[in-house]
């Protein structure tokens, strides 16, 4: 089934406080830059039982307008959803990545001619995109859905998203490890290492008694915050954690999850 509810463990952002020397030589603290990452899973492919005719997209637009994130990571969306979500983010830059059908090696198409099915990450306009990275995991489960990841370098940071295997937790954990330990470092090596935040539905919970624990894919130099279920934000420690918030959504099977950080600029 396409777009079945799955786990995603989320990504995080942090702030470092600088100092400013005043005209009289005194030192005053620089104001912290608040940085918000909002993760949503909109169940909008048209195939899953949680699909409600596209109503999750305007609901997400309304939420974006209220909470005003700097970065939006969106899972289970269609190519046709990019324009309204981008508009809600102030028409900033974005990165969209298609999910493929393994059986035909082509993009899965959402129902109703709404374009390819996939994941996307958006930023507000002040953070322009200067590089892109993404693709499909070398490890996949036995189903037909070929899971994808995507990253954009926006201004002075990287923001990434993914939606991991819903059918096989060990595969989801391996995909998460590939993203954090292989694909993101490769992107840094190619385009420049910067503070990084990752948000998504990892289809992994935070459970210390479970070997498929979302924390087990978080490398040194990063921290993770989760929604108590499968959505997570993982951020490099150049960001500082402030708080998390959850917002109920009426037209999808996941609450929206936001992590507020302070940024190192």
Image (cartoon, helix red, strand yellow):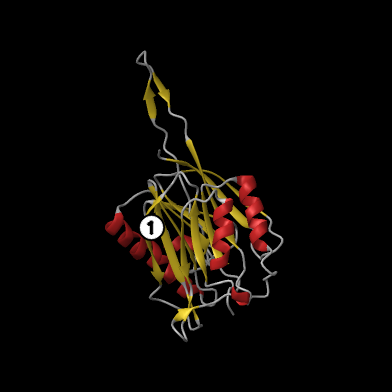
Report the residue that reaches farthest toward the right. 250
Label 1 crowd bin: few (<14), some (14–19), many (20+), radius 10 Å: some
Image point (57%, 57%), residue name: 85
Compared to 42, does 25 lie above or below?
Answer: above
- Up the image or down, 234 lies above or below 150; here it is above
> Which residue is more in the foreground, 216 or 109?
109
Q: Residue at x 46, y 67 (%)?
A: 97
Q: Secondary structure at mark 1?
A: loop
The image shows residue 67 at horizontal and vertical percentages of 61, 46
What residue does disc 1 label? 219
Question: Which residue is most to the bottom?
Answer: 103
Q: Does residue 206 show up?
A: no
Percent coordinates x, y for residue 146 in the rendering: 46, 77
Residue 210, image x, y percentages: 52, 68
Decide which of 217, 51 is in the foreground and name it: 51
Q: Please state if 96 lies on the left or on the right of 63 as rendered.
A: left
Is 144 on the left-hand or right-hand side of 190?
Answer: right
- Judging depth in this view, the residue of 44 and 264 nearest the camera is 44
Total marks drawn? 1
Where is 18 relative to 60, above or below?
above
Residue 50 lies in quadrant: bottom right
Residue that sits furthest to the left in the current view: 189
- Quadrant where the N terminus is found in the figure: bottom right
Q: Nearer the viewer, residue 187 or 164?
A: 187
Q: Give residue 181's position: percent from left, percent from top.
A: 35, 63
Quadrant containing the C terminus in the rendered view = top left
Image-quadrant location for residue 14:
top left
- Is residue 31 visible in the rendered structure shown here? yes
């Amino acid at each position: 089934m396409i777009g079945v509810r799955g786990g995603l463990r989320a990504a995080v952002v942090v702030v470092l406080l600088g100092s400013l020397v005043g005209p009289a030589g005194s030192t005053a603290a620089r104001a912290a830059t608040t940085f918000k990452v909002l993760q949503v899973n909109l169940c909008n492919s048209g195939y899953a039982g949680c699909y409600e005719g596209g109503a999750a997209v305007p609901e997400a637009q309304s939420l974006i307008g209220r909470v005003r994130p700097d970065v939006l990571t969106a899972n289970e969306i269609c190519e046709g959803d990019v324009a309204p979500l981008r508009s809600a983010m102030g028409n900033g830059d974005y990165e969209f990545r298609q999910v493929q059908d393994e059986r035909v090696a082509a993009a899965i198409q959402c129902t109703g001619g709404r374009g390819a099915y996939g994941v996307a990450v958006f930023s507000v306009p002040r953070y322009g995109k200067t590089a892109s990275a993404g693709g499909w995991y070398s490890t996949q489960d036995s189903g037909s859905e070929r899971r994808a990841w995507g990253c954009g370098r926006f201004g002075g940071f990287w923001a990434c998203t993914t939606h991991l295997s819903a059918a096989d937790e060990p595969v989801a954990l391996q995909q998460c490890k590939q993203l954090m330990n292989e694909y993101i470092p490769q992107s840094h090596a190619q385009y420049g290492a910067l503070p990084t935040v990752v948000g998504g539905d990892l289809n992994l919970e935070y459970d210390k008694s479970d070997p498929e624990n979302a924390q087990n894919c978080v490398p040194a130099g990063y921290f993770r915050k989760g929604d108590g279920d499968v959505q997570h934000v993982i951020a490099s420690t150049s960001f500082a954690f402030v708080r998390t918030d959850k917002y109920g959504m009426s037209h999808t099977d996941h609450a929206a999850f936001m992590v507020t950080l302070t940024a190192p600029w």
